[in-house]
Amino acid sequence: MPTLTKLYSMEEAATHNKQDDCWVVIDGKVYDVSSYMDEHPGGDDVLLAVAGKDATDDFEDAGHSKDARELMEKYFIGELDESSLPEIPELKIYKKDQPQDSVQKLFDLTKQYWVVPVSIITISVAVSVLFSRKT
Ligand code: HEM
């Protein structure tokens, strides 16, 4: 049977940023750690510092054990609605300017560096003409 996962926007997660109402977002998943604040071996202050925010990097930096990762499931309440995230303009531009595939890429490079093969051919022709005149 399919399970329904609740989706939360980053705006909504951001409102849960207090000691007694604390959500953290880790790897696109939303956790309500309000009841875990006092028990967290890393302290409640570190959780409060990332309350209502994306704590993926901080979570990974702390080097959590397999047990800790299993324990997380207890506090899982839903997933982050990716469409609620602001679009990064640089990413869009980068994507847009990328050639479609490697063939296209090679074609673009050839267009850009046509001077190199043309110069090689010109020099070769000049050298062979000089040599043929000497003999
Ligand atoms: C649902 C979320 C979380 C759970 C269930 C959790 C659980 C745990 C557990 C069980 C430990 C003990 C060490 C281990 O087994 O790895 C721990 C330590 C720690 N946690 Fe978390 N944690 C969570 C989120 C976070 C976040 C978001 C941060 C950072 C902002 C954080 C920072 C730390 C730190 C600094 C330690 C101490 C590491 C040490 O003393 O070596 N934790 N956590």
Image (spheres, grey):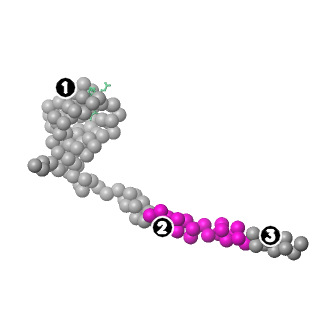
| Residue drawn 47% across the image and 62% down it | 102
Residue 36 is left or right of residue 46, and the answer is left
Q: Which residue is mark 1?
A: 39
For residue 4, the mark is none
Q: Is residue 105 magenta?
A: yes
Which structural element holds mark 1? loop
Q: Which residues are magenta?
A: 101-123
Q: Residues within 10 Å of mark 1 (few under 14, many from 20)?
A: few
Q: For the residues marked 2 and 3, what is the alpha-carbon distance in whole angstroms?
A: 34 Å
Q: Comparing marks 3 and 1, which lies closer to the viewer?
A: 3
The image position of residue 104, as x and y in percent, is 48, 67
Residue 134 is left or right of residue 38, and the answer is right
| Residue drawn 35% across the image and 34% down it | 61
Which structural element holds mark 3? helix
For residue 127, the mark is 3
Residue 63 lies, with reference to residue 55, above or below; the image says above
